[in-house]
Amino acid sequence: MLKKLLQALKGSGSKTSGGAPAVAADPITYKDVTITPTPLPEGGQFKTAGTISQIIDGVEKKTEFIRADNHSSADAAIEHSINKAKQIVDERGTSLFSSERC
């Protein structure tokens, strides 16, 4: 985890609107989708965020989420991001990827 945090501080990973890099975390598989937590550093804390993706008919469909929840550590934000993504998958099911923005 320390290696990932150092990589984030060096500028790897996706950028937030304020230019701070998102924290990179390992993806997990849940109910045939891939969840990649990417907490966003903000004001000394980390905001719940990530992507949910799935291969459908040979095409990767992906959606991103950002929540207002803030955490004092990257590890706590990663754990909460995974739990929030699982909740999204449980609530939305296959309709999660039905919009044209995916």
Image (spheres, rainbow, N blue to C red):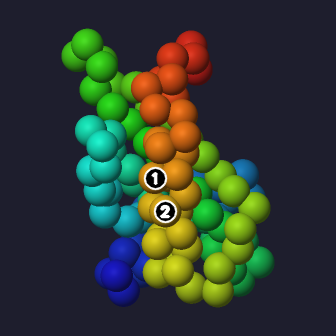
Residue 45 seen: yes
Q: Pointer 1: residues within 10 angstroms few (<14), some, or many (20+)? A: some
The residue beneath circle 2 is: 83
Q: Where is 4 relative to 28, above or below?
A: below
For image coordinates 31% across by 49% down, the residue present is 30
Residue ID for mark 1: 86
Which percent across, then down, holds residue 35? 38, 50
Residue drawn at x 30%, y 19% as measured from the top left:
56
Residue 92 versus residue 15 in the image, above or below: above
Q: Which mark is residue 1?
A: none
Are the two marked residues, 2 and 1, in contact with CB atoms closer than 8 angstroms?
yes
Image quarter in which the N terminus is found: bottom left
Residue 51 rendering spot, x and y as whole percentages = 48, 46
Name the residue rendered at 51%, 29% in the picture.
96
Q: Is residue 10 visible from the viewing direction of this image?
A: no
Q: Residues within 10 Å of mark 2 (few under 14, many from 20)?
A: some
Q: Who is closer to the viewer here, 2 or 97?
A: 97
SS category of the residue bearing label 1: helix
User: What is the quadrant of residue 28 in the picture?
Assistant: bottom left
Residue lying at 60% horizontally and 46% vertically, measured from the top left: 65
Image coordinates for residue 23, horizontal then vertical, percent: 49, 68
* Front residue of 92 and 77: 92
Asked if residue 70 is positioned above or below residue 29 in the image, the reply reads below
Quarter of the image where one finds residue 59? top left
Query: Circle 2 — which element?
Result: helix
